[in-house]
Amino acid sequence: MRNKNIAGLTHLGSGDTSYIFQYDPTLLECFDNKHPEHDYFVQFKCPEFTSLCPMTGQPDFATIIVNYIPDKKLVESKSLKLYLFSFRNHGDFHEDVVNIIMKDFIALIDPKYIEVVGEFTPRGGISIHPFANYAQTGTKWENFRDQRLLSYGNK
Amino acid sequence: MRNKNIAGLTHLGSGDTSYIFQYDPTLLECFDNKHPEHDYFVQFKCPEFTSLCPMTGQPDFATIIVNYIPDKKLVESKSLKLYLFSFRNHGDFHEDVVNIIMKDFIALIDPKYIEVVGEFTPRGGISIHPFANYAQTGTKWENFRDQRLLSYGNK
Amino acid sequence: MRNKNIAGLTHLGSGDTSYIFQYDPTLLECFDNKHPEHDYFVQFKCPEFTSLCPMTGQPDFATIIVNYIPDKKLVESKSLKLYLFSFRNHGDFHEDVVNIIMKDFIALIDPKYIEVVGEFTPRGGISIHPFANYAQTGTKWENFRDQRLLSYGNK
Amino acid sequence: MRNKNIAGLTHLGSGDTSYIFQYDPTLLECFDNKHPEHDYFVQFKCPEFTSLCPMTGQPDFATIIVNYIPDKKLVESKSLKLYLFSFRNHGDFHEDVVNIIMKDFIALIDPKYIEVVGEFTPRGGISIHPFANYAQTGTKWENFRDQRLLSYGNK
Amino acid sequence: MRNKNIAGLTHLGSGDTSYIFQYDPTLLECFDNKHPEHDYFVQFKCPEFTSLCPMTGQPDFATIIVNYIPDKKLVESKSLKLYLFSFRNHGDFHEDVVNIIMKDFIALIDPKYIEVVGEFTPRGGISIHPFANYAQTGTKWENFRDQRLLSYGNK
Amino acid sequence: MRNKNIAGLTHLGSGDTSYIFQYDPTLLECFDNKHPEHDYFVQFKCPEFTSLCPMTGQPDFATIIVNYIPDKKLVESKSLKLYLFSFRNHGDFHEDVVNIIMKDFIALIDPKYIEVVGEFTPRGGISIHPFANYAQTGTKWENFRDQRLLSYGNK
Amino acid sequence: MRNKNIAGLTHLGSGDTSYIFQYDPTLLECFDNKHPEHDYFVQFKCPEFTSLCPMTGQPDFATIIVNYIPDKKLVESKSLKLYLFSFRNHGDFHEDVVNIIMKDFIALIDPKYIEVVGEFTPRGGISIHPFANYAQTGTKWENFRDQRLLSYGNK
Amino acid sequence: MRNKNIAGLTHLGSGDTSYIFQYDPTLLECFDNKHPEHDYFVQFKCPEFTSLCPMTGQPDFATIIVNYIPDKKLVESKSLKLYLFSFRNHGDFHEDVVNIIMKDFIALIDPKYIEVVGEFTPRGGISIHPFANYAQTGTKWENFRDQRLLSYGNK
Amino acid sequence: MRNKNIAGLTHLGSGDTSYIFQYDPTLLECFDNKHPEHDYFVQFKCPEFTSLCPMTGQPDFATIIVNYIPDKKLVESKSLKLYLFSFRNHGDFHEDVVNIIMKDFIALIDPKYIEVVGEFTPRGGISIHPFANYAQTGTKWENFRDQRLLSYGNK
Amino acid sequence: MRNKNIAGLTHLGSGDTSYIFQYDPTLLECFDNKHPEHDYFVQFKCPEFTSLCPMTGQPDFATIIVNYIPDKKLVESKSLKLYLFSFRNHGDFHEDVVNIIMKDFIALIDPKYIEVVGEFTPRGGISIHPFANYAQTGTKWENFRDQRLLSYGNK
Ligand SMILES: [Ca+2]
Ligand SMILES: [Ca+2]
Ligand SMILES: [Ca+2]
Ligand SMILES: [Ca+2]
Ligand SMILES: [Ca+2]
Ligand SMILES: [Ca+2]
Ligand SMILES: [Ca+2]
Ligand SMILES: [Ca+2]
Ligand SMILES: [Ca+2]
Ligand SMILES: [Ca+2]
Ligand SMILES: [Ca+2]
Ligand SMILES: [Ca+2]
Ligand SMILES: [Ca+2]
Ligand SMILES: [Ca+2]
Ligand SMILES: [Ca+2]
Ligand SMILES: [Ca+2]
């Protein structure tokens, strides 16, 4: 309850918090896929993403969307939240943020297929939306990956 | 009429109601498909789904969407309502809820094709939308299933 | 003008009107296709459809959408209005309504391709949207039909 | 369940149902207001209203909205549904429908204040939206009524 | 993390959770208003409200909106979440739910002004939206209350 | 039916039709107000209005909205349609169109209050929306008129 | 300027204008395609289309959408405006309007591919949306045409 | 026609055009108000406004909305377009642009009442929307002005 | 240009940036009001606000809206951006954030009137939107303040 | 800060600014692609594009959308902004603008695939949306290009 921990306010104001606001891929965790007999998609929508511009140091904002088809593991959603927190005071280009998130998912759970989109808010009247995807090599999912890339943003 | 059964209020307040709020797949019922000469889709949209988080016990909310192509049987819509009620005080991960509903449809009516989506409301700023699908093995519908998975959420 | 025919109000209030509110497929009429050299789609959107629930007798409401590619004949739109009126006091399941409308179009004009969707309003928090389609047998349109079914509702 | 009462389909198709589709104000019922110490609004939104045009006999469609401040009684919502069903095969001008519904509410529960809007779908490219309201005479609610009329549709 | 507490799933499935799903007004808590020098509004939007119908025992769904001007105390938002959870297996009419929530706020924090709206999802094609409000007696806020009631839903 | 009157197509193509496409205020007709005991609004929305630009002769398009409170007479909606048709090949400035429609309503039915808005589509990237209103002189409606003008377009 | 040419108002009111409001395909003009090395689409959206119903003589309204891939020529947009004006007092069925516009484009510029959609506003609660397309015979664009027809309106 | 004046392209590319892209209030013109017997609003919506930032020289974009009640004169819409063009290569703060436009209207036509809003697109994630208004001094419109300021942006 | 300063990426990754992410009211700056003869509103919309929850240390997100009527000074928009950046790693309750921002504006420019809204994204399914306002004491703006509070959020 | 550089206002008003408002392709710059191991899309959305009509010299407005798959280089977003500024006082047909932007991207970074859309605002009630695309010759991307063209605008 808020009225019971009021001292916490000053504490946190001093920067003394256990959340990590510098990029840390070890925050991402996983658990077992209990439904391996069917291929299925899991979609994460994360409209509260923020990082810093590597050129100016100013905050950037985006909605990050991850769609993946699990193999043996799924990404745990609370750990995903903490992992995305870790970009808060970290600087990277938009194109890099999207590729980095995708690679961290691959390293942790090696999904059959994954795609990551970053819908960044405009700067100077222009917005950038990178889209990256991946499939396990030597599998039918490589054709799946090519088809998804082909269809991106073609409304 | 409400003014005639007012005693019912206290009754129900005591928890004495005939609806089942613990997961019960036997609630789902079916009837015969009268149009077997054409393959067709039936779509159910269920925006009032609620279950409990298996980790915290807190309520979760979702829109469940089921699209299927019937074989010999169709799912009866009032029984679907009662079946979805049975998740009310039941706990499962989002990915499991979607797979469980799909498997219960398969067990009851073995459709030519079925897909289930769960659009869960956000927690901690992140929302999860699992999508699972299935087709009768050894039929042309297996290719149909693969194509639907390929197209999911690729607006 | 309304002020000139005011007696009509009582008349109609007595149920004495020439419109038919019981299902009557003979109301649907057609005329010649003047553009047979190009295959083209005609779409009808009918947001004012109402029929009765066959189980409870209560009114149901839907938007009916018909997309078809004519062969030698087109459906006349005013006769379609009268035909849809004829479901007003008629009872059928949602899945049946959609299949019946499709079959009546086929019987009248045998289109190269046709599809019918019924977007029914929710009952008990669940809405049902059946989608049926058809193609002339032994033609290339059968593949067209399969592809349209594959793509339905996969946004 | 649908599969248990399948004979009902034919039955109802014969027009043999207990619902009333000719205007009947006795269908509207009420119950006691348990919160008389606070004035409060109750809003009903009824998007599935249909009646007949008194001039042509053709179906009309509307969303009926009722906002009222109860005095001693409230209108029971299921009886409201049945009451609105009774306009189904009944003919009246749009302006009359709205005034008639308002007067039936007044006769049954004499609310402190009530307003009724009918948002009818277009005919010949023109739509009509009548708005009527009422307040108990000799009370402060008469000024309330005048203010609400003044504010209608002034977006 | 989900993968560390997997036994919890069965546990909760057995109904053994610490959340209260029967109406309990003691769950609502408060803390001090630190800005008494300015009158200000606090708005809570709660789109995940669910309770049971007192007549049928079936689930109801609503968005509950609370707008209030604090006096000495504010309602703590996490306790509000727990308090609203307590309606989950509880039965009450829509008009009662809104008045009960308002009265519990008044009992706890006696705000200068408060209003509560319940936007319930439709049943039988009709939705009900009750709106109740209150002001401290003998203050200028009573006129404020009357003006807010006058303006409700008059788009 | 279209297939029975196919000769009509050429006929009309020759311009031989009974509709009037030059401004004619005599087309507007009225009927008696059966509910004089309550003041109420009638709103007409007419999204299919077209006239000609008096400077260039090019077509203009608008949605015309009329809100009025009847006194002894109401405007008949089919005659309104025919009256608005009569602007089709007629030229007037946007500000004039709105004032002319208002004055024709006043001349025919002298309503207690009336307002007319014309939402014209843009030309050269600029759209014009005139709003005119009127009240019977020497009545309380003059204050009503002033208040409505004050509130126009102030979202 | 409007204040300088005020006499024009009366002039035009007399019907003496140089715009053509009877169907005239010679109004459509073209110019050279300067980018023949890339196949590209040009889309025209024309929300202000109006013609007359050939059965009743009443005005119809539509949005006309033309998508085409030019070969040696492009359609000039101001001439398209004048060409569409020429349907103003002309009568044709919705299905004919769409096919006629397509054929006039083909006659003038023989594009590699073209499609025309007419989104007509509802009459009697039903709206009609015809879609026609074409490709140069003996080219790869014929397959393109078949694929576009297959995908139409299948959201 | 484009194909007839193709040399014009190079000409204009050289900057030799008769439009004025430096602020010039003399471009605004007016004509007589033919309806002085009714006070009425005229609204201009101008979504294509662009000027330059006076600090950085970079382009700014806005929708300019002008609402005014004419006295003896109205602003001519084509001259308004040319007047707004004249801000194209001109630099001013957002707050100044809105006040300058208002003052130029006052100087030209001295309306009974006028208000100007500038909805500028965001820079650095922040957008600015100034709103200025005016009334003839010593008239009832001064109270009108105060009420409009009071209501601005209070949705 | 990004390709010229690529070393900056690592630099910023180390936290060495000149932006201030701890609350600092001295960042807010002002400039002179050049239009004191008219009272006018300035609205700032800031959809990219983020701070930390004082209880949990987790990020919060909001749109901050400031509406004010300047007296002698205006707030400079780039300094407002920097000032809002300073909440990035700072913890405060939603109700406090809104009151603090308002007080910092008052301290710097003492506007005739000001209001601040914070539309915070949901946590646990509940969102909080505080609204605070202020007027110079002893002026007519105090009534203005009361009226704006009365109208808040009353759609 | 605005209050520190106030002299700049007059300076810029004199047209003395360093931004280039005549078409200049050398403004576009690039940097290295750090993720060549995955093909990915980058999307730019530019809703603030303006150029001049080559026939009339009047301003045109559009949203320019660029989607490309980089090979060795990416386009730098701030340089894109400056490059698009350079169309401000430049005249070209809509179809040319889109092809020119595409060719300038190809000349600078030779992407594997690129497409450019220009959504121009309406003139005379008609809007034009050109879409051009390209792929490296002799690669699999040529088929990708053909498929994207096939899917354009076919919602
Ligand atoms: Ca996007
Ligand atoms: Ca979310
Ligand atoms: Ca989704
Ligand atoms: Ca659907
Ligand atoms: Ca209609
Ligand atoms: Ca309305
Ligand atoms: Ca319902
Ligand atoms: Ca409501
Ligand atoms: Ca407009
Ligand atoms: Ca308007
Ligand atoms: Ca359509
Ligand atoms: Ca921006
Ligand atoms: Ca605004
Ligand atoms: Ca949440
Ligand atoms: Ca809000
Ligand atoms: Ca367009």
Image (cartoon, coloured by chain):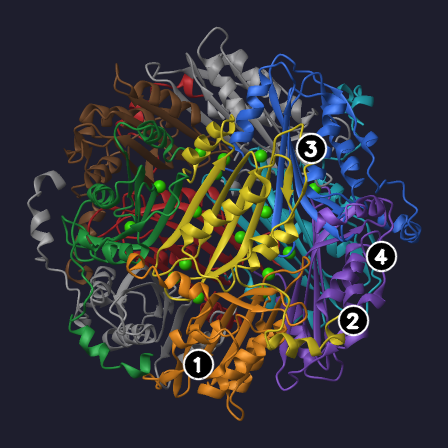
Chain colours: B brown, C green, E red, F orange, G yellow, H purple, I cyan, J blue
**Chain letter behind tag 4:** H
**Chain letter behind tag 2:** H
Give a yes or no on whether discs 3 and 2 share a subunit.
no
Q: Is residue H140 left or right of residue I154?
A: right
Q: Secondary structure at mark 2?
A: loop
Location of residue C20 in the rendering, given as x and y in whole percent from the top left corner = 18, 61
| In contact (CB < 8 Å): disc 3 and disc 2 | no
Q: Secondary structure at mark 3?
A: loop
Residue at far bottom of view? F138
- Which is in the foreground here, disc 3 or disc 2? 3
Amino acid carrying label 1: it is Leu
Q: Secondary structure at mark 4?
A: loop
Q: CA distance from mark 3 to mark 2?
A: 42 Å
Q: CA distance from mark 2 to mark 1?
A: 36 Å
| In contact (CB < 8 Å): disc 2 and disc 1 | no
- Which is in the foreground here, disc 3 or disc 1? 3
Q: Residues within 10 Å of mark 1 (few under 14, many from 20)?
A: many
Judging by the rendered image, the residue that carries numbered circle 3 is G35
Amino acid carrying label 4: it is Ser
Judging by the rendered image, the residue that carries numbered circle 1 is F28
Q: Residues within 10 Å of mark 4 (few under 14, many from 20)?
A: few
